[in-house]
Amino acid sequence: MIDTHCHIAGDEFVADLADVVARAQAAGVDRAVCILAADEPAELDRAAAVRAAWPTVRFAAGIHPHASGRYAGRADQSAATARAALASIGDAVALGEIGLDYHYDFAPKDVQREVFAAQVALAVETDLPVVIHTREAMDDTVDVLRAAGQGRVRGVIHCFTGSSDDARRALDLGFYISFSGILTFPRADLLREAARLVPLDRLLVETDAPFLAPVPHRGQRNEPAWVVQTLAALAAVKGLSVAAAGDAVLGNTERMF
Ligand SMILES: [Zn+2]
Ligand SMILES: [Zn+2]
């Protein structure tokens, strides 16, 4: 199994990274994609420790929408920063996470859009898939992906929390859709309905650790081992065995990254 989106180079995992990796491997999660904040040097530096602790981990880096306010009026600098982070990783498998977050609104919307567009243009130039964070911003996300992506951008909508219609629009763009532990929450019936509509060959699963721990770990620090619960929830939605769902997700992951 693979956790396609976690932040294990973050502060939260410094003290016990080896234990976190051991628990993931014991749970059958033998791989992960570690998302790095391209403009946080301490986190980029910790990628080496993550790589040493878990050699099968792959990396992605980008400017998160929450950080885009730093680049008001200089979106080109956000692309330069992401480019430098990708170069420091060397074998990055994706550009991200990038996107738009109108829920928290940490940066003005127009600045978020400019930075996002610059990141998407960089993805096209470097031929990397994108990992998209979008919250209450699906219309603008689709617009930027169409305009800056020039029909050539590919990738995944991570931690999908949208409607069935949002899922349809992402699929129409050729994107994969990744579900997090929210899929296990009792009140997430609409999300499970959306997951039911996504074809098996477009589904991914993730933890987004340290955030969004699935049932029965809700409220705790999340970690890659617990992607198993989300995969089980997805398998139930699709009427598949966990093994069959895991094989499908792994195949999708290999095609996407
Ligand atoms: Zn995110
Ligand atoms: Zn994330």
Image (tube, helix red, strand yellow):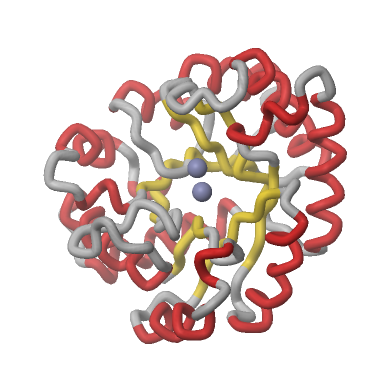
Residue 114 vs 245, above or below: the answer is above
| Residue 46 x %, y % | 69, 69
Q: Please give the name of the residue rendered at 45% of the width and 63% of the height, measured from the top-left corner.
A: 3
Res 228 quadrant in image:
bottom left
User: Quick one: 164 or 39, which is closer to the camera?
Assistant: 39
User: Quick one: 109 or 3, which is closer to the camera?
Assistant: 109
All told, the count of numbered labels is 0
Left or right, 120 with respect to 243, comes to right
| Residue 69 x %, y % | 68, 26
Q: Please give the name of the residue rendered at 37% of the width and 63% of the height, measured from the top-left corner.
A: 221
Residue 99 vs 183, above or below: the answer is above
- For the question of whether residue 212 can be seen, the reply is yes
User: Quick one: 95 or 149, which is closer to the camera?
Assistant: 95
User: Quick one: 200 or 22, which is closer to the camera?
Assistant: 22
Res 218 quadrant in image:
bottom left
Residue 97 vs 111, above or below: the answer is below
Left or right, 88 with respect to 107, comes to right
Quadrant including the N terminus: bottom left
Residue 231 vs 125, above or below: the answer is below
Q: Please give the name of the residue rendered at 25% of the width and 48% of the height, measured from the top-left corner.
A: 183
Q: Please give the name of the residue rendered at 54% of the width and 20% of the height, measured from the top-left corner.
A: 142
| Residue 195 x %, y % | 27, 41
| Residue 248 x %, y % | 38, 60
- For the question of whether residue 149 can be seen, the reply is no
